[in-house]
Image (cartoon, rainbow, N blue to C red):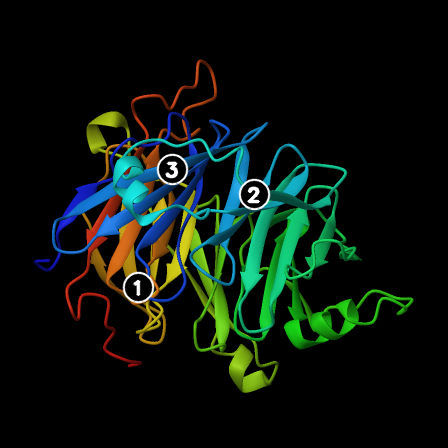
């Protein structure tokens, strides 16, 4: 595929996109969750600039998050039905039948599905740790559930949270939970795995670190650095913060925040030097280079060099608000979910016909940073 090619996925969701994620390993499978109560499975075809719909997974309520499991054939969802579900995205099919369903919508509701746990309120986020074989869900009932995905019959470990969670992300050894009231808890994954393996333990594990967000307004997204060094958060007030896990004074002195996804108000509209501030809805780190992408309500996507503290590039404006971002595991693709946002209100909201999934093929060094200054 030629560098920097961009194309749309066929048959996009009919309502707002809540999340999208590429499969682990070399697979080009892409899962997209939506408020239209479905999860969509696409196959990005190398060399032909296509992302074909392979199948859909119907749910009883809007789906708020989705992630792959240990393989490209396993996935987990979280949604307004208060359930964390596991399903097989590729049930056993004769090879000659694959060609018949490829590119067509297939309802896999009759395929293998397992309810991993039930929360008492909608489940906002779900993340899988391949390094520790853990599935973690965060619910608006102010709890985390830590699951053993290899044994769905095992009850999850429940961890109470001091606030409602809004974003969740995992690094190789940590999981970061961003909550209301600017609360951020960081948990140690080996500690969670040990606690899950010891059900007789009386007290739930405590956070490895408790922090206050560097951002003054509600956290919209969080993403962890692939090198396990730190994380980035974004807010509804057009800002991104970058922090490091190490708790030393030197390390904490490196953290910083910056303004982004803002548009100057024209002078003829009474701008007077002011900006229209948009929420930063999505963050994603490049798995190879460690740079990261941000997407906002202004319909733009920008690439940032976290170490050098500089913007590398900003892509052309998308037709709607950018709701979700994901890099493929090999770093060759960037998926962008665009749909109408709520920046102008919620009256008569409809994402039908306006929701799009774009896939950008990245040039060899397009996402490569230049290092710290």
Foreground tag (3 vs 1): 3
Instruction: Name the residue located 33 percent from the left edge and 70 percent from the top edge.
Output: 309
Question: Which circle's residue, 3 or 2, is located before the other in the chain?
Answer: 3
Foreground tag (2 vs 1): 2
Question: Which circle's residue, 2 or 1, is located before the other in the chain?
Answer: 2
Quadrant the N terminus occupies: bottom left
- The residue under label 1 is 304
Task: Kindly indicate the quadrant of the structure image that contains residue 328.
Answer: bottom left
- The residue under label 2 is 112
Q: Along the horizontal axis of the image, is 174 left or right of 299? A: right
Q: In the structure shown, which secondary structural element does the residue marked by tag 3 occupy?
A: strand
Question: Which circle's residue, 3 or 1, is located before the other in the chain?
Answer: 3
Circles 2, 1 touching at the beta carbon (< 8 Å): no
Task: Kindly indicate the quadrant of the structure image that contains residue 119.
Answer: top right
Q: In the structure shown, which secondary structural element does the residue marked by tag 1 occupy?
A: strand
In the rendered view, tell whether residue 274 sits above or below residue 27: above
Circle 2 Cα neighbour tier, 10 Å, few/some/many (<14 / 14–19 / ≥20): few
Residue 318 locus on image (x, y percent) = 23, 38
Marks 2/1: CA–CA distance: 40 Å
Instruction: Name the residue located 22 percent from the left edge and 32 percent from the top edge.
Output: 267
The foreground one among 3 and 180 is 3
- The residue under label 3 is 55
Residue 168 locus on image (x, y percent) = 57, 55
Foreground tag (3 vs 2): 2
The foreground one among 194 and 176 is 194
């Amino acid at each position: 595929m030629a560098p920097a090619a961009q194309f749309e996925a066929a048959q996009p969701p009919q309502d707002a996109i809540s999340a999208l994620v590429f499969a682990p390993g070399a697979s080009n499978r892409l899962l997209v969750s939506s408020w239209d109560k479905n999860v969509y499975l696409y196959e990005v075809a190398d060399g032909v600039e296509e992302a074909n719909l392979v199948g859909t997974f119907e749910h009883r309520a809007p789906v708020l998050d989705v992630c792959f499991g240990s393989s490209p054939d396993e996935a987990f969802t979280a949604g307004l039905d208060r359930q964390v579900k596991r399903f097989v995205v590729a049930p056993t099919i004769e090879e000659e039948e694959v060609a018949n369903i490829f590119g067509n919508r297939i309802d896999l509701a009759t395929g293998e599905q397992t309810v991993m746990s039930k929360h008492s309120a909608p489940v906002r986020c779900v993340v899988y740790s391949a390094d520790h074989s853990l599935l973690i869900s965060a619910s608006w009932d102010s709890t985390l559930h830590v699951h053993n995905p290899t044994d769905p019959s095992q009850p999850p470990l429940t961890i109470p949270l001091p606030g409602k969670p809004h974003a969740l992300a995992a690094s190789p050894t940590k999981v970061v939970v961003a909550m209301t009231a600017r609360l951020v808890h960081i948990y140690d994954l080996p500690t969670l795995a040990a606690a899950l393996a010891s059900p007789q333990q009386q007290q739930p594990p405590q956070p490895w670190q408790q922090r206050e967000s560097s951002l003054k307004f509600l956290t919209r997204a969080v993403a962890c650095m692939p090198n396990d060094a730190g994380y980035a958060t974004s807010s509804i007030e057009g800002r991104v913060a970058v922090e490091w896990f190490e708790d030393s004074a030197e390390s904490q002195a490196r953290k910083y925040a910056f303004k982004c996804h803002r548009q100057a108000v024209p002078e003829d509209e009474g701008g007077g030097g002011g900006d229209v501030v948009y929420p930063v809805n999505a963050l994603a780190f490049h798995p190879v280079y460690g740079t990261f992408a941000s997407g906002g309500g202004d319909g733009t996507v920008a690439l940032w060099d976290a170490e050098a503290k500089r913007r590398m590039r900003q892509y052309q404006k998308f037709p709607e608000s950018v709701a979700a971002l994901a890099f493929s595991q090999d770093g060759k693709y960037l998926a962008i979910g665009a749909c109408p946002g709520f920046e102008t209100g919620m009256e008569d909201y409809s994402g039908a016909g306006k929701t799009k999934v774009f896939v950008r093929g990245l040039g060899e060094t397009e996402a490569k940073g230049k290092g710290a200054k």
